[in-house]
Structures are given as C-alpha cells and as structure tokens.
Image (cartoon, helix red, strand yellow):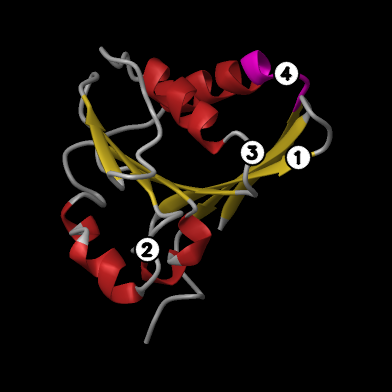
Amino acid sequence: MNTREPVVTGSPEATRRLARRFGAGLKRGDCVALCGPMGAGKTLFVQGLAEGLKAKEPVTSPTFSLMNRYNAAFPVYHFDLYRCSSEREFDDLGWDEYFHADGVTAVEWADKFIRFFPPPFWRVVIEIFTEKKRRISFEFVTSNPAAAP
C-alpha cells in the first residue's frame, strides 16, 4: 500500500481545493473509496474531485438514487452507499460494471462494503477535527486484506 501524508484543511473551500487537485491527477479506471462519519465532507470532496476532472454539471449526493453519473473529461460515477443495507443490494447496483471501467468511480460510505472493492483503489478517509477543520488521509490500496472470500 502506498500512502500520502495526511492533510489538514481549515475550511470547506480548502477541502474542495485539495479534492480538485487530487481529482485532476486521476485517470480512467481509478476508484476512490471515501470513508468518514456523517457530515465529514465526503460529498464536498467528490464535488472538488469532479471539478478537477472538468465536470460539466453540478455534483449532488446520490443518497436516494445510490449512483449519479457526471460528464467530465471522462465519466465520473458517484455512488453513495449510506442507504445500501445488504450485500445483495450492493451487488444489485451493478457496481462491478463501473469499477475500473471507462471513468472514475467515487464511492461515499465505502467502508460498508470495502471488502468487495477490487484493487487497486484509493482509500480516502476524512476525519472531523472541528466544525470546519478536516484531516484527510490518502492510501493507495493494491491488495485488499478485507476482501470477501
């Protein structure tokens, strides 16, 4: 696993800028697993990531639809697994058609089903320090020790 030093951001805009720079470096087939508590800024991070990929429309949380697709330099597939309650429901999303495909896949609440994520993928953990301050860590996972048997 490759890791980057964690970054502490002091505002939502700083978090968005960091995500924009991160997103600009992604390529087709990359997957980003976002982990963190409610209100940490996972959707905000995906908004910045999509901006870094030159998204042509606003990014909104797919909490109820479970997946949104955005047009950018290449497609951005945005999953939100918060309401996904079972392995069967996760599998029914057809996630395996999007991971490592023709675009970038960003998954909020990824920790719920991370054992199914085929490596390699980025694991981005967002921790809340204060109302505006976040600690964001990046880990490039090349083998998934939590993989389902």
* Image quadrant where one finds the N terminus: bottom right
Region in magenta: 9-14
Residue 122 screen position, x and y as percent: 47, 48
Q: Amino acid at mark 4?
A: Ser
Q: CA distance from mark 3 to mark 2?
A: 23 Å
Dot 1: element: strand
The residue mark sitting in front, 1 or 3, is: 3
Residue 10 is drawn in which quadrant? top right
Question: Which of marks 4 and 3 precedes in the sequence?
Answer: 4
Is 138 on the left or on the right of 65, as rendered?
right
Label 2 vs label 4, nearer the camera: 4
98 relative to 85 in the view: left or right: left
The amino acid at mark 3 is Gly
Chain-order first, disc 1 or disc 3: 3
- Marks 2/4: CA distance? 30 Å
Q: Determine which residue is flagged by label 3.
A: 39
Residue at the spot of label 4 = 11
- The residue that mark 2 highlights is 117
